Image: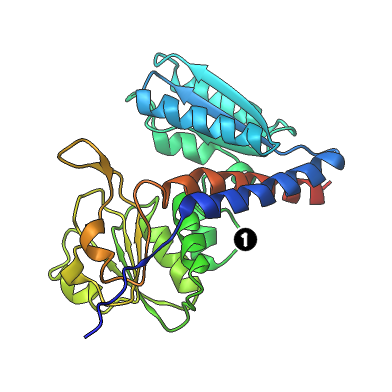
Amino acid sequence: MTERPSARIIDGVAISRQLRADVAARAGELTRKGVRPGLAVILVGEDPASQVYVRNKIKACEESGLHSVFEKYDASLSQDDLLARIEALNADASIHGILVQMPLPRHIDPHRVIETIATAKDVDGYSTLSAGELMTGLPGFNPCTPYGCMKLIASTGIELRGKHAVVIGRSNTVGKPMALMLLQQNATVTICHSATADLKHHTLQADVVVAAVGRRNVLTADMVKPGAVVIDVGMNRNDEGKLCGDVDYAGVRDVAGFITPVPGGVGPMTITMLLVNTVEAAQRAAAAL
């Protein structure tokens, strides 16, 4: 009996690099026509992780030829002042995308903030109108992490039509939009969550599994159908303090057909899809001139 080969690794770094090259080309073409894609990033407070994320987003913009505006405010900034600043950016024709880094200080309502961003500039795809556009198939902006997951799945060459996809997690930022995007590609989709009675029953039937709950080893080798595509959105730490995902990578890679590593899988794609959405927003704005 021959031993089954390990899963093929889906290289998020390489795929991200290809997409960013396309972003840079599109941004260059728009800039030559007098419309340089612009992204405004607002950070309120001193959250260390947020500072790293923002720094990476600004760097990615600069490397891809996008105009970036970074505005940092003390945690004492009032909600009214933040909303007023967003309204000013909504009216700024040089800004095509607006991103307010989460989490925000407790006195600021994140829902109010997200809903204040103009839909045409909601490149994070988090507003209720953006969510409605996704659900009804209108051309809005897809949330960046699930959008990146779709690109990773596409890189495998797997035809999603008629396939069974299981999404573990039901968050508004990943799980729910992920399920909708898979539905758009004619997959049959099951959403599992903390109240699902028998998770293994569902995942064993899945041609594609997306794990996005933020819990280590939620998906193990005995829960995966041989040859399945496994996308690991989780960002956790193991007992040694090293970064790991929601999937038992060492075990699952011997069963799956394709798998994303952590780090180096979904992570690089999130910022890349933010750039893709920003360039798309700029193209729409240019077309409306």
Q: Which residue is pictured at 45% across the width and 51% down the height?
A: 145
Along the viewing direction, whichever of 226 and 169 lies nearer the viewer: 226
Q: Where is the N terminus found, in terms of image quarters?
A: bottom left
Along the viewing direction, whichever of 263 and 186 lies nearer the viewer: 263
Question: In screen coordinates, is 219 left or right of 151?
Answer: left
Question: In screen coordinates, is 42 left or right of 264?
Answer: right
Check disc 1: other Cα within 10 Å, few if <14, some if 14-19, many if 20+. few
In the picture shown, does residue 258 fall above or below 101? below
Find residue 163 and report its horizontal and vertical position in percent. Answer: 40, 80
Q: Which residue is pictured at 56% across the width and 21% down the height?
A: 71
Question: In screen coordinates, is 249 left or right of 81?
Answer: left
Q: Residue furthest right?
A: 33
Find residue 125 and report its horizontal and vertical position in percent. Answer: 52, 49
Q: Quadrant of residue 118?
A: top right
Q: Which residue is pictured at 32% across the width and 25% down the height?
A: 106
Q: Residue furthest front?
A: 2
In the picture shown, does residue 157 fall above or below 252? below
Q: How many marks?
A: 1
Find residue 119 and report its horizontal and vertical position in percent. Answer: 59, 46
Find residue 39 and report its horizontal and vertical position in percent. Answer: 63, 34
Secondary structure under the numbered disc 1 in the rendered image: loop
Q: Quadrant of residue 228?
A: bottom left
> What scheme was used to colour the molecule?
rainbow
Q: Residue furthest left?
A: 197
Along the viewing direction, whichever of 189 and 134 lies nearer the viewer: 189
Residue topped by disc 1: 139
Q: Which residue is pictured at 33% across the width and 53% down the height?
A: 171
Amino acid at dot 1: Pro
The answer to whether any part of residue 90 appears in the image is yes
